[in-house]
Image (spheres, rainbow, N blue to C red):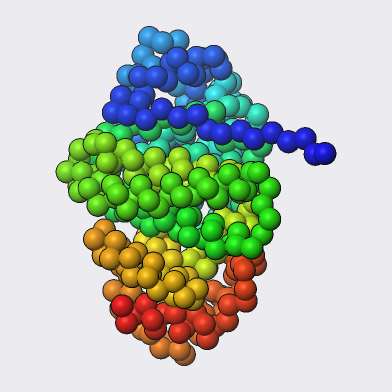
Amino acid sequence: MKTYSVCFTNYTIGGEAYEHVPAVCGFYGRRVLLVAGEKALCAAGDKLALSIKNSGLEIVRTVIFKGDCTYSQIGKCAEIAGECQAEMIFGLGGGKALDTAKGAAFKVGLPVFTFPTIAATCAAATALSVVYKEDGNFDSFYFYERPARHCFIDLQVIADAPFQYLRAGMGDTIGKFFECHFAARGDKLDHNSALGREISNMCYEPLLEHGVQALKDCREHRASYELQQAVLANIVSTGMVSLMVLDDYNCAVAHSVYYGLVLLPGFEEAYLHGDVVAYGVLVQLAVDGQEEEMCRLKGFLTELGIPSSLKQMNVKLEREYLRDVLKEIVEGPDMEHIPYKVTEDMIFAAMEKVERL
């Protein structure tokens, strides 16, 4: 019988989450390397610095993160950690900054702590980094033995961030629920994957209940209970699913639709990842014949203001125009483990059905 360990990210969430940093991180040493996005540093840097003042912890070096998470960026931060004799690494910012901090920490064997300033991804709670090539194209996933030791989610910082990131995070989180259940359909799951699939239920129902109000509160910079529930779904629930299930069950049609559409010139720059994944869920539901659920989700996405048709994303519903998109969707790696074969004809017919909603 194989022996294995499962590690989760502990977390603190609230309007004063950073006040808990000294008590949690003090066990790991004193010297901190901070890897922070430029905007994140402006939004939360002073608050973080104040939280560790006179605590014994010291930020000995700050690396301003810009661009993509690349292996060269990870290597550079790891080298700096050695130079300044850091005993731990703090990652502050969005997903790419956090992924870079995690990669650097793993490379030099240091504990890492995450401080997400937006709720667009689950990067703060996962044991991997999405790594890009120098030209901005996807390179690979960098997997780790464990996620960050602790995640500090300052709800007021997220409430003050652009609401579009929270909305896109909801779209991506909804995708986790539908894709996990779809990809795992018919499989006999081990304990980890079965538990992860059940946790994925917390990626949808809480958002249906609280998502609209959470988005309104974020627009008004209010750290409310509803915002908290949405942020927990986007970061914690989604991160736990990612940690638990086999990689086969993390993505399916919805993400593949995203990776197909970004082949269109200018598309990736115009639309956030999670917004497009949410549209991809509609396509997946149409392919799978779940019309009642498709209509329910369509109404919810409309309430959130997420584009839910190709027309709303300025994409022509023409077979020839979408030729490369359709090919990428059905041949993409996210389609390698789904319950039945999906063809280009099925995807195009599903897009037509979604467009008629």
Who is closer to the viewer here, 260 or 229? 229
Which residue is pictured at 45% across the width and 40% down the height?
Answer: 236
Which residue is pictured at 55% across the width and 50% down the height?
Answer: 197
Q: Position of residue 103 (x, y in %)?
A: 59, 39
Q: Position of residue 130 (x, y in %)?
A: 55, 51
Say if 309 sits above or below 181 in the image: below
Say if 87 sits above or below 208 in the image: above
Who is closer to the viewer here, 289 or 159? 289
In this rendering, would 71 be left or right of 13? right
Q: Is residue 96 visible?
A: no
In this rendering, would 268 be left or right of 214? right
- Quarter holding residue 77: top right
Q: Position of residue 167 (x, y in %)?
A: 31, 53
Who is closer to the viewer here, 220 or 7? 7
Which residue is pictured at 48% across the width and 66% down the height?
Answer: 254
Q: Quadrant of the C terminus?
A: bottom left
Say if 213 sits above or below 351 in the image: above
